[in-house]
Amino acid sequence: MVAYLFYRQRDFFAIAIAACWLSTNFFGVATYAADALTQQLPLVSPGGADPEHDWGYLLTRWNKLSKARQFGQAFRAVASFSMLAGLAGGGWLLWRMRRLARTPS
């Protein structure tokens, strides 16, 4: 959604930053999803009750709990792609800006 708003504003460098920002979130989701089977990560609950592992619940409900590690790997791949795309896009934009600044009018 953020990338779309930046696109409407024609702020392409901000789109690259948003892609990198998105990747940091996906890296966290990857770790949490991969933990669904072993559930070794410490969980917190705002109400003080015994917390439930969200990905453990979802993957159990979808009958895919045994694939938790693969879900984590898929999220990590998406995170890596998003980071690389953001860095490449941002780097390309910076290169173009520098090149255009050197061009005489």
Image (cartoon, grey):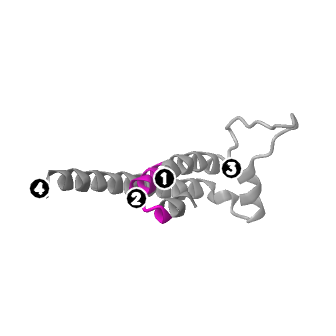
Would you say 45 lies left or right of 4 here? right
Which residue, given by chain and number where applicable, does mark 2 sit on? 12
SS at circle 1: helix
Which numbered disc flags the more N-terminal residue, 3 or 1? Answer: 1
- Identify the residue at horizontal 40%, vertical 58% (top origin): 12
Asked whether the residues under the numbered discs 1 and 4 touch, taking CB atoms below 8 Å apart as contact, a structural biologist would say no
Asked whether the residues under the numbered discs 4 and 2 touch, taking CB atoms below 8 Å apart as contact, a structural biologist would say no
Which residue, given by chain and number where applicable, does mark 4 sit on? 104
Which numbered disc flags the more N-terminal residue, 1 or 2? Answer: 2
Which numbered disc flags the more N-terminal residue, 4 or 3? Answer: 3
Residue stretch in magenta? 7-20
Residue 25 pos. (x, y %) = 56, 48
The disc labelled 4 sits on which kind of residue?
A: Pro
Assign the magenta stretch its main secondary structure.
helix
- Identify the residue at horizontal 24%, vertical 56% (top origin): 96
Residue 22 pos. (x, y %) = 52, 52
The disc labelled 3 sits on which kind of residue?
A: Leu
Distance from the alpha carbon under mark 1 to that under mark 4: 32 Å
To which quarter of the image does residue 57 belong? bottom right
Distance from the alpha carbon under mark 4 to that under mark 2: 24 Å
The disc labelled 2 sits on which kind of residue?
A: Phe
- Find out whether residue 8 is within the magenta segment: yes
Which residue, given by chain and number where applicable, does mark 3 sit on? 37
Asked whether the residues under the numbered discs 2 and 3 touch, taking CB atoms below 8 Å apart as contact, a structural biologist would say no
